[in-house]
Amino acid sequence: MVAAAKPQKQLLWVDDEADLLESHRLFLTEKGYGVRMATNASDALELLRRQAYDLLLLDEQMPGMRGVTMVREARELAPTLPVVMVTKSEDDGTLRDALGADVTEYLVKPVNPRQVLSVVTRILEGPKIRQQAVARSFVERFRQFEATDPRTLDWRGWIERYAEMVQWDVDLTAAGETGLHGSLRALYPDTRRAFAQYVGRSYSRWVNQDIEGERPPLSIDIVGEFLLPILEHERRALFIVVDCLRLDQWRVIEPLLAPLFEVDTTHYYSLLPTATPYARNALFSGLFPGELAARHPDWWGEKEDETLNAHERELLDLQLRDLRGNTPVRYHKISSVSDTEHLERNLANAIAPEGVTAAVFNFIDLLTHGRSESAILYEVAKDEIALRQLTLQWFNRSPLLALLREAARKRVPVLLTSDHGSIHCNTPATVLAKRDATANLRYKFGADLRAENPEQALLFTNEDDLRLPRHGGGLIGGNTLLATGDSFFVYPTKLREYQQRYRGSFLHGGVTPEEVILPLAMLTPRG
């Protein structure tokens, strides 16, 4: 049986001098396109009513109806039809009219056939060509990925490997390459396992031995190493922390900032546990959690609640004072509708005239936590791809983007980062513990505490290994258990309840690249 011929892409070209374009029509026909010519807008619109076309080429200056007017009428017949305006006019007004009519491309005569072919191919075949290019590149790189032993990587190598995996994840998703994306996702379990082993071997040395180059930038370093240099050259800066922003979420919103800023993205490692009371306090204070609790015992309680992050402005003020003397600090925390409305009403004055303006945006963290409690959110953000898309939709209409636009308008440099990421958890990990153990799902403190399967968690028996607070001579019970992979902690007596409630949730507090390796972006206003 002979396979059916692939249908031609159909082009409609409207020009009152159609007879002079015969060579163009023949060239496009030879390249596999069907081309129908029309000499005026009325005939062309009648053709559009009778048949669907893949692309419209037209002149702007024709007898009767102008090209721009025809575009608007053609849009009523075929709303998604790509339009290429091919005209003699180089007038700026004509170009603005064409752009206002949402033409896809604008060419000024004289044009040769290959120019037209290039534009037509890019518009009609571009997505497929890009998809094929992404697929070929990934297949070549995939073999190298499989051949590389992640156990040989240092902290820089882990950043490079994970950042590349994230970019492939985003690119393959955009290209619709579901099969290859599945191959990439199959690498993640072994990657997470090797990463947890690496962090388990290295973390205590990182936080207890300050040897230059031997450890990655950590949460405590961000203000001193990245924000301070900005203040040495600028009289003010905007410091933004997006709670629970993963690297892949940053990758999908980063392109939206290119028109406003020159974007330079690097990476750092979150402190452990990868949870807000520890990681974000370390960002603002420049202190390990144990140091923070010792210096400011009134600001650090026994409970894991929001009061542990109630002094971020004061902590940033104290850190800047230690680093460079008195520095004005303005602080915004956006975690509710009223916070958003207040920021938007006062946007013109949101950024201080000098010093540091710090802003914390909690939407993504609220989304990931609320997802476990809401069937609707659970369905809308059912996996990493959906979570990225939801993040992108939020960002497009968010007070965060409004604040960034204001910073670009006022030419204020921005340092944007996250305090920790999150991981899509699907594997229950049974924990054996006494009643003093804390209730967190990705990290726990307790006296007699261990995972039934040791491969699902890292166990630290000394709080000094993590530079965590002491409570009555030791950490709440003495042991710290941090989840690895996509596991979440459950108790034998509540196994079914926890599985039903938390399986498929985005959680944080453990040790995976998604939670630990974070974006750190320097945004320099353009112009």
Image: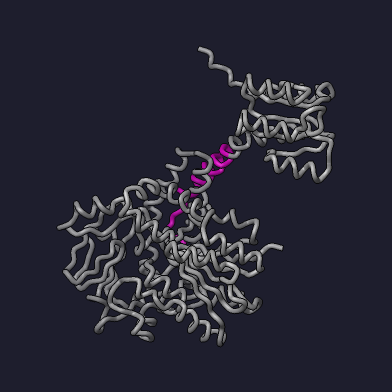
What residue is rendered at 76% in x and 23% in y? 25
Q: Residue 352 at what x, y percent from top left?
A: 58, 75
Query: What is the quadrant of residue 101 in the picture?
Result: top right
Residue in front for this viewpoint, 44 or 295: 44
Q: Residue 61 at what x, y percent from top left?
A: 81, 33
Is 161 situated above or below 272?
above
What residue is rendered at 57% in x and 67% in y? 347
Magenta stretch, residue numbers: 131-154
Q: Is residue 134 magenta?
A: yes
Q: Is residue 301 magenta?
A: no
Q: Residue 28 at what x, y percent from top left?
A: 73, 25
Q: Is residue 343 visible?
A: yes
* Relative to 478, 343 lies left or right: right
Residue most toward the top? 1
Identify the image's colour scheme: rainbow, by chain, secondary structure or one colour.
Answer: one colour
Quarter of the figure with the C terminus: bottom right
Residue in front for this viewpoint, 258 or 96: 96
Query: What is the quadrant of residue 9 in the picture?
Result: top right
Query: What is the quadrant of residue 327 in the picture?
Result: bottom right
* Relative to 432, 35 lies left or right: right
Q: How many marks?
A: 0
Q: Is residue 30 visible?
A: no
Is 223 situated above or below 145?
below
Secondary structure predominantly adopted by residues drawn in magenta: helix
Residue most toward the left? 493
Is 491 situated above or below 172?
below
